Amino acid sequence: TLSACTVVIPSRRLRMSPPSGANGWLSNLNHSVSPDLSSFCGIVSVSQVQTLASINRRVAWRLMPILVLVYVLGQLDRVNVSFAALTMNRDLGFSAAVYGLGASLFFLGYLVFQLPANLMLQRFGARRLIAVIMVVWGLVSASTALVTNAAEFYAVRLLLGVAESGLYPCIMLYITYWFARQNRAMAVSLFTLSVPIAGVLGSPLSGWIMQYFDQTAGLAGWQWLFILEGLPCSVLAVGVLLMLTDRPRQARWLTADQRAGLINQLDQEQRADGAVQAGNEPAGGVWAAMSAKPVWWLAAINFLYTGALVGALYWLPKAVVRAAPALGEAAIGWHVGLPYLAFAVSALLWGWSSDRHGERFWHPLSGMVLTGAALFWLAVDLDLPSTDMAITLLMFGIGAGFGSFWSMTTTVLPAHLAAAGIALVNITGSLGSFAGIALSGQVINAAGQTGAGFLLLSGATVVAIVLMLAGRSVLNMRSA
């Protein structure tokens, strides 16, 4: 990343360095200079720098709100079954085992179709593919209101995983089409805000729907929950078709000069990677990604880290109950949901800092350290205030580490490996989620206490940290 560039203005020379402060997340884009400018550092006008900043701001304001909204809806439809289970299990006669198996089948479908969906992105474009994904998952989620037995519940959850499988890797790859590296961490961090938004708003919304729509038109509250949080996704897919643009070359909402500047910025970055040689992209695809050392390094880290954080999220209500057994379910939801605000703060702070300093390794590593420390803290029997602080630290660590990890991933992987590589790394995260939830549950059952599961998950985070440090010594890590 260009940290300082000599700008030539007739009759004088100025030194331009990144500012020390920021007013909001977009202010970082005001001062971001493409690393490609270093190739002609010394003959860059102030107007050229300002033009690039203006392009970045316009792209961010156009695309990021849409992507955040899409993923917030996806998160709601993924996890609202946990709220529906409060009455759905009783109404349909589901045991805890039936519900647990059905809920977990989401991840099986999610695993199977991630890679095909991400490869389809390059062929059909993000606009169409994300819209199709939204229509399908909205209809499938809403159809959960119609299930009457375990077999139907299993089928719907499996299909929902298939429908949502391509969403996250598609959006990650889509971001690389529009944002150069020095702006990408902030874009990813802003997108990651969809997780705490869904966590903070989704719990009260789901509870409100179940309470106040129960028996409306003869339907139970849990049925209305799936309908009212599912069908809007299918409707909003039309907005995605109208508002998203596949590539910068097709962006009619940019002027011709803005399009040319953005395309030139991204093309020079690809050429610097060696991903474009003589106008031809080297062989990529699944096999090339599977044989690439950086892909496996990232995949192993994601398996451990995502497994630890997802596993922890499934046991946080138990940690609150352990600290305060008399709390009601609504109160427990607030004790788990409000700390997501710390997730939002750290995601933005780490993303801004990573872009400002052009650094892509120590930011995710520090987030993992905070996550591991919080998990170790939760392994101890705590009172309620200490549990709240530990959960808040956990959310802060996850927000810092998760978005930064994906910024590092899109930096490490060259363009010809990005589509398959991102999907493979994400697949291992889903496998880690399976392992984290299942293994921590077995450990908790064997030990008879929730803390044992958190101790296991903190150990997995420690191994991920060791892999990060070991990989940096053998990989040629780029700073931005």
Image: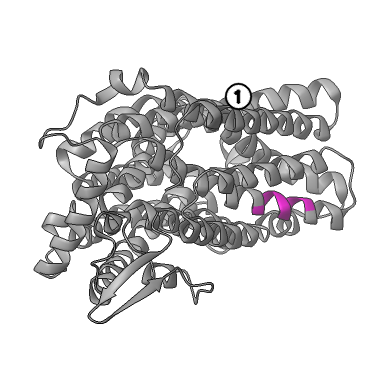
Residue for point 18% across, 51% down: 246
Q: Image quadrant of residue 460?
A: top right
Closest to the observer, 368 or 334: 368
Callout 1 crowding tier (Cα within 10 Å): few <14, some 14–19, many ≥20: some
Q: Dominant secondary structure of the magenta stretch?
A: helix
Q: Label 1 is placed on what type of residue?
A: Ala
Residue for point 22% across, 34% down: 120
- Left or right: residue 85 versus residue 180 is right
Residue 205 visible in the snapshot? no
Residue 175 visible in the snapshot? yes
Counting from the top left corner in percent of width and height, residue 259 is at 15, 62
Q: Given the current orientation, which residue lies at the most extreme front position?
A: 11
Residue 393 painted magenta? yes
- Left or right: residue 222 versus residue 16 is right
The N terminus lies in which quarter of the figure? bottom left
Q: Image quadrant of residue 114?
A: top left
SS class, disc 1: helix
Counting from the top left corner in percent of width and height, residue 233 is at 34, 54
Counting from the top left corner in percent of width and height, residue 17 is at 44, 69
Residue tagged 1: 435
Residue 474 painted magenta? no
Q: What is the image's colouring?
A: one colour
Counting from the top left corner in percent of width and height, residue 39 is at 26, 54
Closest to the observer, 71 or 207: 71
In this picture, is 284 found above or below 215?
above
Part of the protein shown in magenta: 390-396
In this picture, is 325 found above or below 60?
above
In this picture, is 335 found above or below 109?
below
Q: How many marks?
A: 1
Residue for point 23% across, 35% down: 275
